[in-house]
Amino acid sequence: MNVAAAAAKTLFNYPSSPSSSNSANISLFSYYSLTSFSSSLCRPANFFLRNLNIISHSSPPHSTSSLVIEQKSSTTESNTTSTTSTSTVEEVDKQEKEEETSNSSSKSVSRRLILLRHAQSSWKDRSLRDHNRPLSDDGRVDAITVSNKLQQLGWLPQLILSSDATRTRETLKIMQEQVKSFLEAEVHFISSFYSIAAMDGQTADHLQQAICQYSKDEIFTVMCMGHNRGWEEAASMLSGTSIELKTCNAALLEAPGKSWEEAFALAGLGGWNLHGIVKPS
């Protein structure tokens, strides 16, 4: 069946065969007109099919979703690289800090020891036991003066070990009221500091044991508060110098060591450096 006949059958419901009884009714003019008409109808369809065939064989362009996925993938890779780089830097910094801490802990530092005799006590009430005697008015003034001098020198204790006698307690209380750093220090009252001071030649060793027991490596300045005869005897034995400690006098001693145990072991008796003696006047 040719195109014209197909068009005739579709449009006019005529049979497609030329031998049909109705074929004589179709004029030659109508036939050619119909042929021309059907050709014009088919031409756009053929053009559309050709273009469709070309499109189907060409490479499809990137869709918007594909671009978004690629951008997300690129961003993720960039973030991953950035995170990895940041993590690496943090690990290096952490390792360097650990090495610095390790190096600093392995170095000897100056250990400072303050041996302070209590301020002047009062003898007004003779009925009081020696352990319970309070400070005199002059003793209170001296405690204020010495605390200020220690602050000016920068000799501020992080740990204070004190006799539990009333006069040493009152001396410390005045110093804490005068200088805030004394209030911030760790404090322990040790009853044996009162009795050991009366025993010849035993105070220095007793102080060493107490300091090593209560101190830590990060504590660099310790103040021990007590009584004579023991305190000036200990100061003299540790420094190797004859030292006199009157009331509210403080001997300032130094020795290097990674710890207090090492400082005492290396300096021994006579190896502590006497930095000075602080006096009220």
Image (cartoon, rainbow, N blue to C red):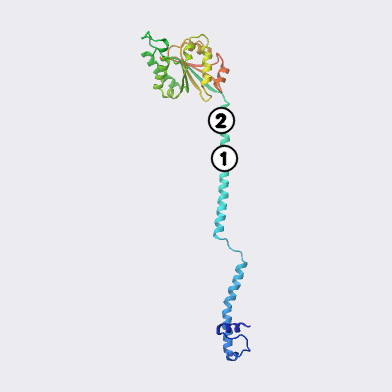
Tag 2 secondary structure? helix
Quadrant of the frame with the C terminus: top left
Tell which circle, 1 or 2, labels the residue nearer the N-terminal end.
1
Q: Is residue 217 left or right of residue 152?
A: right
Q: Is residue 178 left or right of residue 237?
A: left
Instruction: Please state the horizontal and vertical placement of residue 91, each as a whole percent of the image.
Output: 57, 38
The local crowd at label 1, few if under 14, some if 14 to 19, many if 20 or more residues have their Cα within 10 Å, is: few
Q: Is residue 238 visible?
A: no
Residue named by callout 1 = 89
Q: How many marks?
A: 2
Instruction: Please state the horizontal and vertical placement of residue 102, each as a whole percent of the image.
Output: 58, 29
Q: Are marks 1 and 2 in contact (CB under 8 Å)?
A: no
Instruction: Please state the horizontal and vertical placement of residue 58, each as a whole percent of the image.
Output: 61, 66
Instruction: Please state the horizontal and vertical placement of residue 25, each as a whole percent of the image.
Output: 58, 91
The local crowd at label 2, few if under 14, some if 14 to 19, many if 20 or more residues have their Cα within 10 Å, is: few
Report the disc number at residue 208: none
Residue named by callout 2 = 101
Distance, label 1 to label 2, CA atoms, is 18 Å
Q: Is residue 143 visible?
A: yes
Q: What's the residue type where badge 2 is placed?
A: Thr
Q: What's the residue type where badge 1 is placed?
A: Val
Q: Residue furthest bottom?
A: 24
Quadrant of the frame with the N terminus: bottom right
Q: Quadrant of residue 148?
A: top left
182 or 106, nearer to the observer: 182
Tag 1 secondary structure? helix
Q: Is residue 2 left or right of residue 273?
A: right
Residue 39 to residue 194: above or below: below
